[in-house]
Image: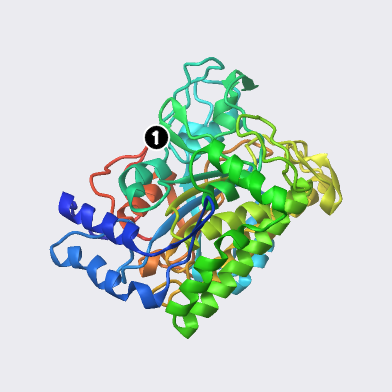
Amino acid sequence: MKKQPSISQSDLALQRHLTLSRRNFLRGMGVTMALPMFESSITGALRAATAPMAKGAAPLATTASGAPLRMAFVYIPNGVHQENWWPTGEGSAFQLGKTMEPLAPLKSSLQVLGGLDHQNAKAGNDGAGDHARANATFLTGARARKTDSADIHVGVSVDQVAAQRVGHVTRFSSLELSCDSVRKSGRCDSGYSCAYQYNLSWRSPSVPMAPEPNPRLVFERLFGSGTGAERQKNFQQRQATQKSLLDFVMEDTKALQRDLGHHDRAKLDEYLTGVREIEQRIQRAEGFGELPDPKSDTPVGIPANYGDHMDIMFDLLAMSFETDSTRVATLLLAGDGSNRNFNQIGIAEGHHYCSHHRNDKDLVDKIGRIDRYYMDHFAKFLKRLDAKKDIDGQSILHNSMIVYGGGNSDGNRHTHDNLPVILAGAGGGTLNAGRYAQLGGKPMSNLFLSMTDRMGVSGVERIGDSSGRVTAV
């Protein structure tokens, strides 16, 4: 792939103007509700968005058609059951393994990538602590300093490398989500700070981007306006009147519907139905109680069922892409070393305990079932993205790059070679989706460089331990 040329300040200003000048909000009584992009209102912007290409500069985080290009990273803990994970065959003639069977309808939209390694997650002279290193290294490619004090240090993660360059074209430069606890300090794994294990995104080598685990707070961030205190007040007003967020934007919705064509009206109706459905699921989880305190380490309102929690966070992530609220996101399903049980699928033992199975048949079987459980929910997310049409007629999945995987390969042995990695989406048509490829022992950071290229980010020559680019993807 050719290196993207740099973009002038005038081109950057044009792109920001195109993004912010669209009528993509509904407003009412303290609510600012983001909307999906509509074909009937974006045609001119698409033509303008491709104009910088004629001058030799590729638009940031944009496909060749002018539609948004998104990237997301989803983390699974504790490695995978190797036999069930890897496909058979090669190239486009591959057959999905047992773990990936839920992805069968989307086989042509993904790549299973083998042979990607994270050397900096290995022990080296640092001794024990593979779970902390796996988490910290996954998106940075860097070695975490072994400390449980304030002098944490690892590297800038790939999502923030992109967000710091393309984040200005959306409402939020990036979105960090989690289905786990949030811990910013303390000792967690063999002398490593908890910050390494409970954060996936790093703004600088010493500053993690704390993820949000509470669906209500994410929902209010996406659809509320003003400061945190103002969003709290607006939520309390809706709570007192027992009204939906949609009730507060009803008049603006009616006015917008009159301006839209038939297909866009249908798209708006589908979107509003989806917003209300998510709102109702959040209300059920929290009993429509107080808006959680954003300063709390254990906020209330998180669904008791782990699968429900994952589904809501996946749906909020999908909605942030659909509304072009951000083009860069991370979702930590659980920190590496998580010992969560899976009673909902009949597994009372903790995940970490099962991962050290020592070839015990019962525990090996349970690891395979846990891997499949995670995959079921990821597949549901991808299917939602695939069903949503973007402004260029392609699906949002087509115009995305979604990495799913973890920093441990085999949890039983704590290996960090041949990591379990799926790259879903077509990157707007720039990725060779629909294949299984063994890349032969390359740093995973090489994949990240290739992804930043496609986001239109120039001047990034190294991420972590990268040694080049994965040109084959």
Q: Is residue 456 visible?
A: yes
Picture residue at 65% right of the left edge, 63% below the top: 276
In this rendering, the answer to whether 328 lies above or below 298 is below
In this rendering, the answer to whether 386 lies above or below 275 is below
Q: Is residue 409 visible?
A: no
Q: Position of residue 350 (x, y in %)?
A: 79, 38
Q: Position of residue 372 (x, y in %)?
A: 71, 57
Q: Nearer the viewer, residue 10 or 123?
A: 10
The quadrant the N terminus occupies is: bottom left
Crowding near pointer 1: few (<14 within 10 Å), some, many (20+)? Answer: many
Q: Quadrant of residue 311?
A: bottom right
Q: Position of residue 116 (x, y in %)?
A: 47, 48
Residue 382 appears left or right of 302: left
Residue 154 appears left or right of 233: left
Q: Which amino acid is tagged 1?
A: Val
Q: Residue furthest left?
A: 55
The quadrant the C terminus occupies is: bottom left
Q: Residue furthest bottom?
A: 262
Q: Quadrant of residue 290?
A: top right
Picture residue at 72% right of the left edge, 56% below the top: 281
The total of numbered circles placed on residues is 1
Q: Position of residue 64 (x, y in %)?
A: 30, 69
Q: Secondary structure at mark 1?
A: loop
Residue 414 appears left or right of 50: right
Q: In this figure, which colouring scheme has been used for the structure?
A: rainbow
In this rendering, the answer to whether 153 lies above or below 255 is above
Question: Which residue in the protein does label 1 denote?
Answer: 156
